[in-house]
Image (cartoon, grey):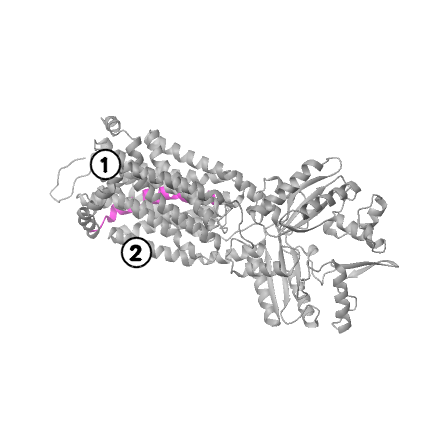
Amino acid sequence: MSNSNPSDGKREQPAPSAEPMIERLIFNNRLPLLIVFLVLTLFLGYNAAKIQPDASFERLIPLEHPYIVNMMEHRDDLQNLGNYVRIAVENEDGDIFEKEYMETLEKITDEVFYLNGVERSGLKSLWTSNVRWQEVTEEGFQGGTVIPDGYDGSKDSLEELRDNVLRSGEVGRLVADDFNSSIIYAPLMEKDPETGESLDYRELSQALEQKVRQKFEAQNGNVDIHIVGFAKLVGDLIEGIESIALFALITLVLTTIFLFWYSRCVAGTIVPVLASLVAVVWQLGILRLLGYGMDPYSVLVPFLVFAIGISHGVQVVNAMAIEASKGFDPLTSARLAFRALYIPGIVALVSDAFGFLTLLFIEIDVIRDLAVAAGIGVAVIIITNLVLHPVVMSYIGITKGGVKHVQNHDGKADRKWRLMSYFAHPGVAPVSLLIALVLVGASVYYKQDLKVGDLDKGAPELRPDSRYNMDNSFMVENYSTSSDVLVVMVETPQESCTNYDVLRSMDRLQWRLENTEGVQSTISLADVSKIVTRALNEGNWNWYEISRNQTIINASIRQAPSGLINTDCSLTPLMAYLDDHKAETLRRVTAEVEDFAEGNNDPDKHEFLLGAGNAGVEAATNEVISSAKNMMLVFVYAVVAFLCLLSFRSVRAVLCVILPLGLTSIIAEALMAQMGIGIKVATLPVIALGVGIGVDYGIYMFSKLETYLKEGYPLQEAYFETLRTTGKAVAFTGITLALGVFTWIFSPIKFQADMGVLLTFMFLWNMVGAIWLMPALARFLLRPEKIAAKKK
């Protein structure tokens, strides 16, 4: 670099021989580049504006897991036991055997029948013809619909209705134990049979609110309506997502304020914010062009893209301010800043991207979508914040106020950086490593309680006091059959599902399950056979057994409900109603079924297959996450380590960058265990995100440290210079990233709040690790004299 001082007081541009080709390509074509950026931003912005909220039951489940493969193979025979809504209509001032209540229930049933997405053939209510009563009399079987013929709402017809309900076996299922409410059960279709389009959960949830809850609660002041089910849960999540716009605005305002406080430069504040917003627009536009929507999980990624963009923009502003304070003009300052940052910046962002893409190994589409969204976002940042940002700044430059702020801060900040440089001192470094080892030991101890899956009842994605969880509590408290159902599919050859051996094996499995902690009750075709056989023999309990006589069995299941047997008698489900869907409950119950299946499956007679129902889906998801967690961590760290090795060409350097990240991961898991946050679909990506983004600090810090070591500085002095030039930017980066996700803590969506807590901690602690632990590791791992010799 030339040290001559032109007459205008500005230093001349560095010799062209020192310029990398990519720098010449960018800065020699600034105007055409800006035009291209403008056109692309308008085009992608147009597409970004059209992106729609998207949610799908199938995208939230591991479609390649054996449980889900079994469920999807037999889904037509299971009446959509995995995807439904249950609507409880409560009479607040009486019971269900009132004329006005029954009229309201009939109207609600009709309304639900015509909602888009409802599989009408499977709809169940006291008013539907598939809800029947049956009894055995001296004259044989008698039965009919629960609503008696000629029902007119009179006292006599209501009494007959009461008798029919008691004889139907629906008390505790469709009718509450206290008779104050009844349920409308509506199975859902994943795709519209006419158009082939996926079910719009947002539209369905709004219809349930407006056309059912609000409409009929307003019409009948004594009625209170409670709605649960996957579709309603997703609808509530999408509504919560819409509040994210407020968080985005708060984040934008706070980030802008902090950035101005940091730079004292209007251009150094506005340009990185705009460049980061352009990155978000590009990301959303590309996602829309690729056919993606914004589901409740990937909708958080634009926050991260904005925060990552700001963090790298800060590095550019910091580097330009330093060069401008030396007297360089805006163009030269921008070129020098780009030259110093493009390699560590690209390495950091590529590490981010590959860290996110490791999530593709998890066989759950919604996590894979998140990986793609994050990967695209980071790839875009390489262009917008490492190219667009410095090019725009090359025209504007750092204002005099910004330059003066850097110059005035040098003396005052030097004392702070000098003190912090003692982290690399031979006497302090061992203490830092000892503290780190203590933290590792304590974290390993406290993270023993970390669980996979949900740890709370209800929907853990929402807060306990949310309307959905309050509705779910009502269902649990008033109905004997839980909303958490595990379905074991008993597969047989055609016309063989009612054979004695099949029913007897089902009965034995039911006995084992009903004596397993966490199982409330079970029901299967075996129960129907035993109940009817007893009824056919004057109610004698000695006959409450599965008969060895096939003729008697055939007679006993002739009137079996359609949901317990398919059309060709090749499949019959066994349903277990669980206390909850906590991870421990699911693991205990599925282990019992698998153990039974291993000893009793006979391909020629019957096979017991897991597992449908919402509990089966949850159990499969937990297994996938449990097996993927460690593999994902290995891939994340392997990719980040490999990229660092390519950049620094030293295993010792890689350890200096990676080990602080490892400490953060271990502490974060301990934090999750103590906060009662399980590893699940919502929180698993946090681990990869925290590592992928956290590596940025170490890469920027170490690349600058290595530069000074090559110039012959002793380690502590080199670290002091690193702090003077990069330390403030790294600290601000950590605060900016944390700020971008901190506002999530106040979200009505609990899983978003959990992610906010964890990411805020990981971003801040990764920054602390880079500033505090990395120099201590460098004291023991690096050989400064060898690094200096490399340059020579």
Quadrant assignment, res 789: top left
Tell which residue pokes out farthest to the right in this image: 139
Residue 589: horizontal and vertical position, in percent?
63, 45
Q: Residue at x 54, y 57 (%)?
A: 235
| Mark 2 neighbour density, 10 Å: few (under 14) some (14–19) many (20 or more) | few
Instruction: Say whether residue 473 is magenta.
Output: no
Q: Amino acid at mark 2?
A: Ile
Q: Which residue is mark 2?
A: 257
Whether residue 387 is in magenta: the answer is: yes
Q: Using the rendered image of the protein, determine whether residue 665 is visible from the camera's viewpoint.
A: no
Where residue 14 appears, as percent x and y from the top left, is 20, 36
Q: How many marks?
A: 2
Residue 679 lies, in percent from the top left, at 50, 45
Residue depicted at x 79% and y 69%? 150
Of tags 2 and 1, which is closer to the observer?
Answer: 1
Prevailing secondary structure of the magenta residues: helix
Nearest the camera: 529 or 30?
A: 529
Do the residues bearing badges 2 and 1 touch, measured as CB atoms within 8 Å? no
Instruction: Give the residue type that dot 1 points to.
Output: Gln
Nearest the camera: 161 or 4? 161
Q: Residues within 10 Å of mark 1 (few under 14, many from 20)?
A: many
254 lies left or right of 216: left
Q: Earlier in the sequence, mark 2 or mark 1?
A: 2
Answer whether residue 238 is visible to the viewer in this image: yes
The quadrant of the picture occupied by the C terminus is: top left
What's drawn in magenta, residue-wise?
370-399
Across and down, in percent, residue 748 comes to 47, 58
Write down the residue under mark 1.
716
